[in-house]
Image: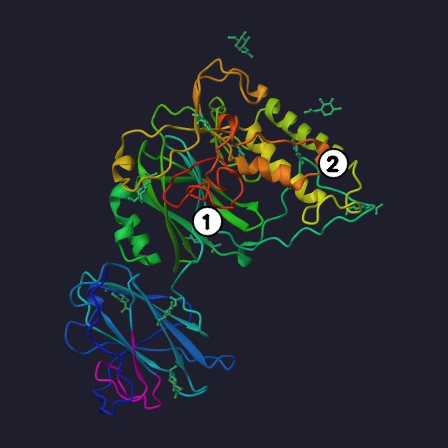
Amino acid sequence: MLPQFLWALVVLTGVPSARPQTTTRLALSLDTPVTLTGKNFSSISTPVLFSLPSSSTSSSEVTISLALCAAASSNPPLVFVSNSSDSQVVPGPNGGANVFGVQIGNLGLGNFTLGLSSGSTAGVLAVYGGISSDSLEIGVTQGSTPLHAPVPHLPFFGDSTANEALLFSPPFSPPAPAPQPTYPNYTLPQANVTLPSAPSSQNSPNFTLFLAPLSVGLSALPQTACAIRAGVTSNTRAAQSAKVLAEQLWLRDALGWRKEWFVGQLTPLTNYTVYAIQDETQLSGPIYFATKSASFSCQLVHALPYCPTTAYAVPLPVPSPRALAYNASNLPDSLATPLLGYITNFTTSLLTTACGRDAYSPLQTCADCQAAYKRWICSVSLPRCGEFPQTSDSQQQQTLAVPAAALAPQPSGTPPRNAALGNVSDYTALLPCIETCNAVDRACPVFLGFRCPLPQFTANASYGVGYIDSADGDVMDGGVPGVPQDQWGNVFCNAS
Ligand SMILES: *[C@@H]1O[C@H](CO)[C@@H](O)[C@H](O)[C@H]1NC(C)=O
Ligand SMILES: *[C@@H]1O[C@H](CO)[C@@H](O)[C@H](O)[C@H]1NC(C)=O
Ligand SMILES: *[C@@H]1O[C@H](CO)[C@@H](O)[C@H](O)[C@H]1NC(C)=O
Ligand SMILES: *[C@@H]1O[C@H](CO)[C@@H](O)[C@H](O)[C@H]1NC(C)=O
Ligand SMILES: *[C@@H]1O[C@H](CO)[C@@H](O)[C@H](O)[C@H]1NC(C)=O
Ligand SMILES: *[C@@H]1O[C@H](CO)[C@@H](O)[C@H](O)[C@H]1NC(C)=O
Ligand SMILES: *[C@@H]1O[C@H](CO)[C@@H](O)[C@H](O)[C@H]1NC(C)=O
Ligand SMILES: *[C@@H]1O[C@H](CO)[C@@H](O)[C@H](O)[C@H]1NC(C)=O
Ligand SMILES: *[C@@H]1O[C@H](CO)[C@@H](O)[C@H](O)[C@H]1NC(C)=O
Ligand SMILES: *[C@@H]1O[C@H](CO)[C@@H](O)[C@H](O)[C@H]1NC(C)=O
Ligand SMILES: *[C@@H]1O[C@H](CO)[C@@H](O)[C@H](O)[C@H]1NC(C)=O
């Protein structure tokens, strides 16, 4: 993506270093990035110089990290650092004792860890080159973890309507595993649970959402936080295209807490590129998702403590005017009460076995059975809406053949899967993944009589079969494509 730098890392070549007249040195501070743009770059051959902060006694090294905030020009900025004890040394392409080049890789990121003899004069950083279109962010941290880095996990797409979407940050702060209940006082959580309290903002990473239509071209920029932020905020189409209407921390599953964003003002039938920026300098993404057509009539349901993974469109009427979507406060009682009743009654039946004393499986416990049942009952009680692919900008972009999703038309008059939904008008269901059913079958004692339809018979009328596990159910993750949804915005079946 970026031109290969033509300079080599030159160390200890014995070439005498330049000793120009004292030039102004700007100070870099720990953990606070500095940006060089436009006129900040030196137009002549003298470099822009910075003094590095000295390391504290607890650590004898600092890490310099670089991020390109715009695609590199033909005269890109080049960065050299030195930890020479001779404070007159100006690090540069001619090398010298203790002079190092910091290479920028193809994501637009670079880092270098510099040893510092404690207490001594701190190091020097020099930036050569760069023209007005270049933009470079420089960070310094103590120790060996760079300030600029990709986040290892991706954001998560909940679902979309024509102009709204539910998006989640990568997970953080996984909860401690709940202690296993023990016989004879084997207690399981109530149906209507409350979420534990969210980690405090000081103890959680600060995630910010950035998204734009595919046509804005975010994925062609350097994949750095500053480049994506600039790419969204400086582009009027991108900046006006979406708005976060609500956000909160949400514990979806055991992976941990996530920032959840409820996004509005989206354009129908458009493919969006999504990034999450952590603490200003770390980038997660991209993932993609497509909005539905303008005629899509289902409504988003989310933030249900008893169905924590539910974050998708359900065939329900438009919520009362002041609400953005359905959550635990406005989900109709006709849906919530029976759902919680099923969980309560199932739990009562389950506890008639001597949970924790008579093992019915070497691998599974009553707590696992209840958890699998809750996930399944949520996905069948709250059917998910989908939409058959439409000719659109997102479809034209699609080049690789992807499997067709588990979509089943539900013309009005079809008996609803959940009687409490009443007579809903025409919609297309995105069927639950059969694995949500098989997980209950596998985790629960046989006497409960829980059964899933068999794949060779009618399973595909009510479930998505062969997406996660192989169609016969024998090979875990052996389905096509092996996941319920992918980072490109394809959702094959409902795994929530
Ligand atoms: C870069 O230039 C801007 C505007 O001229 C100035 O405010 C800023 O301090 C400069 N930054 C550095 C690191 O020199
Ligand atoms: C300078 O940094 C390099 C690379 O981290 C290290 O090997 C060297 O020991 C350091 N020199 C001094 C004087 O600290
Ligand atoms: C730091 O730079 C090295 C190469 O110099 C690279 O392999 C590594 O991935 C970088 N680390 C981060 C967090 O970017
Ligand atoms: C049984 O366990 C629950 C939760 O772990 C606890 O609140 C309760 O006091 C225990 N009851 C007895 C009789 O030990
Ligand atoms: C998180 O980041 C945003 C945007 O960068 C900033 O406005 C906000 O104050 C930060 N919040 C915290 C708790 O640091
Ligand atoms: C639920 O929705 C109401 C109305 O839109 C809102 O005021 C409330 O904050 C939401 N609660 C959660 C947990 O999302
Ligand atoms: C679930 O519990 C909360 C309080 O803990 C209560 O406000 C809410 O009405 C309950 N939901 C249902 C459907 O019973
Ligand atoms: C749960 O069990 C009670 C008592 O047997 C019954 O009245 C109720 O209808 C059951 N609830 C559901 C949702 O099946
Ligand atoms: C969105 O665009 C990306 C990049 O072209 C593509 O790979 C992906 O399949 C598209 N997603 C959808 C849902 O159309
Ligand atoms: C659902 O439709 C059927 C047939 O059209 C009708 O008899 C019934 O009253 C309707 N039920 C509700 C709750 O609207
Ligand atoms: C279900 O599978 C059978 C064969 O196994 C196939 O004939 C039928 O078309 C499938 N139905 C759906 C709705 O995909």
The magenta stretch spans residue 86: yes
Q: Position of residue 417 (x, y in %)?
A: 55, 22
Q: Position of residue 66 (x, y in %)?
A: 32, 68
Residue displayed at 37% across by 32% down: 163
Q: Residue furthest right?
A: 184
In magenta, the rendered stretch is 83-102
Residue displayed at 40% across by 58% down: 280
Label 2, label 1: how far apart the Cα atoms are: 35 Å
Q: Is the CB of the residue bearing disc 1 within 8 angstroms of ligand 5?
A: no
- Location of residue 274 with respect to 335 vertically, above or below: below
> Dividing the image into 4 quarters, which one contains the N terminus?
bottom left
Q: Quadrant of ligand 3?
A: bottom left
Q: Quadrant of residue 438?
A: top right
**Would residue 472 be seen by someone viewing this image from the given angle?**
yes
Labels in figure, total = 2
Q: Amino acid at mark 1?
A: Ser
SS assignment for the magenta stretch, majority: loop
Which structural element holds mark 2? helix
**Would residue 304 be seen by someone viewing this image from the given angle?**
no
Q: Position of residue 100 (x, y in %)?
A: 30, 80
Residue displayed at 27% across by 30% down: 391
Which structural element holds mark 1? loop
Q: Nearer the viewer, residue 32 or 220?
A: 220
- Location of residue 391 with respect to 78 vertically, above or below: above
What's the mark number on residue 350? 2
- Location of residue 92 with respect to 293 vertically, above or below: below
Q: Nearer the viewer, residue 39 or 414?
A: 414
Label 1: few (<14), some or many (≥20) within 10 Å? many
The reply, left or right, for residue 307 in relation to residue 228 is right
Q: Nearer the viewer, residue 459 or 431?
A: 459
What's the mark number on residue 169? 1
What kind of colouring is applied to the model shown? rainbow
